[in-house]
Image (tube, rainbow, N blue to C red):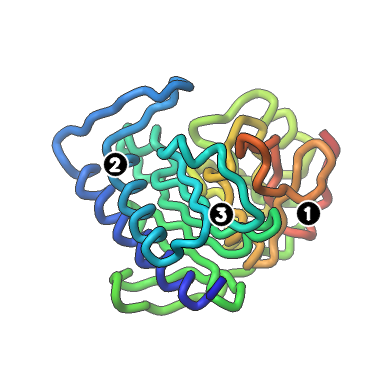
Amino acid sequence: MDYEKLESVSRRAALLAGAKIMDIYNSDDFEVKSKSDQSPVTEADEAADALIAEILRAEFPDTLIVTEEQADSHSAHADSFLIVDPLDGTKEFIKRRGEFTVNIAYVENGVPVRGVVYAPAKDRLFYTRADGQSVEETGALAVDTVGDLTPMSVTKADNSALMIVASKSHRDQATDDYIAKYSVKDMTSAGSSLKFCLVATGEADLYPRLGRTMEWDTAAGHAVVLGAGGKVVRFDDHTDLTYGKDGYENPFFIVLSPEVELKSA
């Protein structure tokens, strides 16, 4: 993979998809449907998915592309592939809470090595550069002009006073019980893959997810965390979370700064 090209193309695709999403988000009304698993999907999900897939297929015609909204891609497998969640946080989008993201990642041999996470309603853009370092871009976030880049780094966690981030729409008693095992300084909640990015920027030390997710939900945020020096591990045995699994479904997982002393399930 040409990582310089991947960085440029993924950033551009995410920004263009974000603009398309915001056009629909700011409209008076938009259509909401239910998928076969009863999860919601909007015209913004479908429009962004089609736009990103078209750009990636034109630029990387020999690379498998797995996208959330194109079910025919879910049965395909390869050692290396691009994986897309065009609008993570659809519930946040529907409720007009702003905490939704565009996610594009590249996986090599089970590891998401590069990724971009764009929160268009928040004007926050995070991605891994060609060299693997994660950055947050600030400024106008223009498609054709790269703004100021701030390298991202996970915090050096203080295990006597941890900062925890948890899901806004999927919080449950099991999650609260697990968090209670730690010495917590403060907690925050966030929607979509923004939770990964809060760990990557050092705004949080730990994010446990005890709920169903798919690889397209997590791959881009996972790549950003890795590029900031963090880790993403399985909840059950604390081994690295891997990608390319049958069905692209994840087990429960934990996102963390390496200094966090993990508690057993």
Disc nearer the start of the sequence (3/1): 3
Could you tell me residue 191's position as x and y percent? Answer: 47, 41
Instruction: Look at label 3 and name its amino acid.
Output: Gly
| Label 1: which secondary element | loop
Q: Which image quadrant is residue 257 in? A: bottom right
Q: Quadrant of the N terminus?
A: bottom right
Give the label on residue 74, or none: none
Where in the figure is residue 171, as x and y percent of width and height?
57, 30
Q: Amino acid at mark 2?
A: Ala
Q: Can see residue 191?
A: no
The mark lying in front, picked from 2 and 1, is: 2
Q: Amino acid at mark 1?
A: Val
Question: In the shown orientation, is residue 56 left or right of residue 154?
Answer: left
Disc 2 packing (10 Å; few <14; some 14–19; many ≥20): many
Q: Where's residue 9, x and y in %?
A: 40, 68
Which numbered disc flags the more N-terminal residue, 3 or 2? 2
Residue at point 38% right, 53% down? 53
Q: What residue is rendered at 57% in x and 64% in y?
A: 114
Q: CA distance from mark 3 to mark 2?
A: 20 Å
Asked whether the beta carbons under mark 3 and mark 1 sit within 8 Å of each other, the answer is no
Q: CA distance from mark 2 to mark 1?
A: 37 Å
Gap in angstroms between the C-alphas marked 3 and 1: 19 Å
Residue linked to disc 3: 221
Q: Residues within 10 Å of mark 3 (few under 14, many from 20)?
A: many
Q: Could you tell me which secondary element the residue under label 3 belongs to? A: helix
- N-terminal of the pair, mark 2 or mark 1, is 2
Residue highlighted by disc 1:
260
Q: Nearer the viewer, residue 122 or 220?
A: 220
